[in-house]
Image: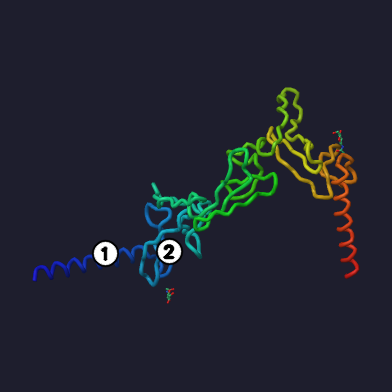
Amino acid sequence: MAKIIISAFLCLAMFGSLAQAAAGACREANGTAPVAGSCDAYIECKNGVAEEKLCPDGLLYNEKSTGYPCSYPIDVECTQPQARLQAAQPTDECPHQFGYYRMGDASHCGQFMNCAAGRGFVFDCPEGLAWNPATYKCDWPDQVEDCDAEAFLGFRCPPLAPKSDLLGEQEQDYTFHPSQENCQVYFICIEGRPRRIGCGEDQAFNQELNQCDDIDNVPNCSSDIRAKGAEIKAARASAAAGRRKLN
Ligand SMILES: *[C@@H]1O[C@H](CO)[C@@H](O)[C@H](O)[C@H]1NC(C)=O
Ligand SMILES: *[C@@H]1O[C@H](CO)[C@@H](O)[C@H](O)[C@H]1NC(C)=O
């Protein structure tokens, strides 16, 4: 008899505490809530019944999300003190099951990988741009920590002129430099760090204007490049003429 009473009591106690936990965890009948001390676990409530869940490896619980409750770390501000994370589940390709990851070293910063369920998909930034893990965007390489812009772009900026505050001269912050290999490319050095700028296909860098200009105005391009530029301009002109006829 005593046994039955004790187990009934235990049962009641357990049920009571579960229900209490659920009631406490669920702020709404249907929704999610954070788990104290964790950034990737969360409570999911369905009809007021709470269940603890874990985001996929590499994602974090996003309290602000109105849809799927897990997001990339960059979109989540997890303020749990001393927060735990589940152990990483790396694959041959990926450090975590999900996420965006930079590839290469400081002189190869233009590629990144998107991991989805442990499979890695490699992407290239547009030429001259580097993957910025701080913003999840392709960015000027001088803006990306751990990217050596000069090594990455293969262009070394001339040494900065010593600053002379005494003369009160306007400092020149930018210098322009043609690419030695490609007349349609130039570099801007900003505080000694280069950015690569490509002109359009029918344009080239004009050193007198320090900007891209109609390819016909830049005699320095090879005849191949000039011919290609002329072709593109002709195609554009005939497309524009076609549109005018239709209108
Ligand atoms: C919660 O979801 C269930 C099923 O999806 C639904 O029947 C119920 O009405 C919802 N409750 C609230 C308070 O929205
Ligand atoms: C062509 O190249 C020469 C020598 O590199 C340079 O001085 C000149 O300014 C260039 N012309 C243009 C239009 O870029």
For label 1, the residue is 17
Q: Nearer the viewer, residue 154 or 51?
A: 154
Q: The disc labelled 2 sits on which kind of residue?
A: Thr
Residue at 75% from the left image edge and 38% from the top image edge: 187
Q: Farthest residue in the front direction?
A: 92
Q: What SS does tag 2 mark? A: strand
Task: Indicate whether 147 appears above or below 138.
Answer: above
Instruction: Classify mark 1 as within 8 Å of ligand 1 or not, answering yes or no.
Output: no
Where is residue 147? Give x, y as percent: 61, 39
Residue 224, x across and y down, in percent:
86, 46
Residue 225 in the image, given as x and y percentages of width and height: 84, 46
Q: Residue furthest left?
A: 1
Q: Residue at x 86, y 42 (%)?
A: 222
Tag 1: residue type?
Answer: Ser
Task: State the residue at coordinates (31%, 63%).
Answer: 21
Mark 1–mark 2 distance (CA, rounded to whole Å): 20 Å
* Label 1 with label 2: CB-CB less than 8 Å: no
Along the line of sight, which residue is nearer the eye, 131 or 29? 131
Which quadrant of the rendered structure holds the N terminus? bottom left
Residue 73 vs residue 216: left or right? left
Q: Which corner quadrant of the image does residue 234 belong to?
A: bottom right
| Residue at x 46% of width, y 55% of height | 60
**Residue 174 falls left or right of residue 12:** right
Dividing the image into four quarters, tell me where ligand 2 lies: top right
> Which of the 4 image quarters holds residue 190?
top right
Q: Which residue is mark 2?
A: 32
What SS does tag 1 mark? Answer: helix
Give 77 or 91, whichever is nearer the viewer: 91
Residue 19 position (above or below residue 191): below
Residue situated furthest top in the rendering: 166
